[in-house]
Image (cartoon, rainbow, N blue to C red):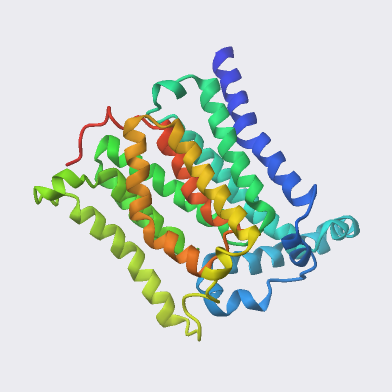
Amino acid sequence: MLKIFDEKINGFLFVIIFPFLLFFMAYYGFESSYVVGIKSMEKAPDFMFTSVYAYRVIPNYLSVHVTEAVTHIVNSYFPFTKSFLLKQGTLFYHSTFLINCTFFLGTSVVLNSILKLNPVELFVNKTIRSLLHLLAVFFVVIMQYVPTNCDSIALFFYILGVYFTLKYLQSKKSTDIIYLSIVIFISTFVRETACLNIAFFAAVFINFDELKKRNFAFIKEVALLIIAFILPYIGLRLAINQKSSFFEGVYLIKNFTSPYNLAGLLFGVLSIFFSYKLCNNEGRVMIKKYLFFSLPYLLMISLVGLFWETRLFMPLILTGIVIASYQFKNIPARL
């Protein structure tokens, strides 16, 4: 009984408390050039409701209503704390921290569950597995130098989708593919990175050798996931009419000429390569397949994203860590 209690305490410390402290320090211990602006904002800025940001319905809704709730609580119940809080940033900034931290901790919990699903021999040891988990946490926290209202939420739903994909791989239960479809549907209201869950599912289940034999057993599952993404994606663009529906600008040349953007690209590439080196043969094949199916996303962030905002690589980096830890060869072949 004492051993079980110790394990639960250690899990709580490493999965919740330590990540929380890291996240807290990232928001209040130092600030980047990106943070200066958001710390002075009193409410969600207007640009969140125009252009491409308008389609991020869930983050925008939370930004508005959590800020209102925090403002009401502070003014009504804790007015003596207001002067102290405002020295650290506006109530909008604190609300952004609360939202992002909540979903970040959710990501930590789900990731911890994934790492225990079917680990390779190297990560069967709990201590080694904990170190891998903390490495993933450090990656997420480092990239908080660009605080947004959507990335932590999107990352949580993405990792949750990865979890249901791997559960489906193990059990073939229809409930898991249904849960995955629901996750993709909801997360499309957060950010377009929901499509990466389709890429991960395809990497896990599509066997190119079987494709050559005209075995299309996976087609129903993939089609269901695509529909779960397309329906809200198109619906949002029909319901919210914006002049610029897909992007704010094209940054392709800037991405490959600016030293900052090149540094961000190098960081992303080396991070994924690090995961690749950790993988066994099956894992390396899986990473190659995943990157292949993620090409539309990689192309889009090259065109309309900024490599210096390395948060864009975060789903790929976490996926590499998950693949490096997971034992694929002991799972019965899907096709």
Quick one: 175 or 39, which is closer to the camera? 39
Q: Where's residue 101, x and y in %? A: 64, 49
227 lies left or right of 161: left
Quick one: 247 or 129, which is closer to the camera? 247
Q: Residue furthest front?
A: 257
Q: Quadrant of residue 276?
A: top left
Quick one: 298 or 8, which is closer to the camera? 298
**Residue drawn 48% across and 41% down?**
273
Q: Where's residue 93, x and y in %? A: 74, 61
63 lies left or right of 193: right
Q: Where's residue 191, x and y in %? A: 49, 64
Q: Where's residue 167, x and y in %? A: 33, 39
Label tally: 0
Quick one: 49 or 136, which is closer to the camera? 136
Q: Residue furthest top?
A: 2
**Residue drawn 31% across and 33% down?**
282
Q: Quadrant of residue 148?
A: bottom right
**Residue drawn 58% across and 19% down?**
5
Image quadrant where one finds the C terminus: top left
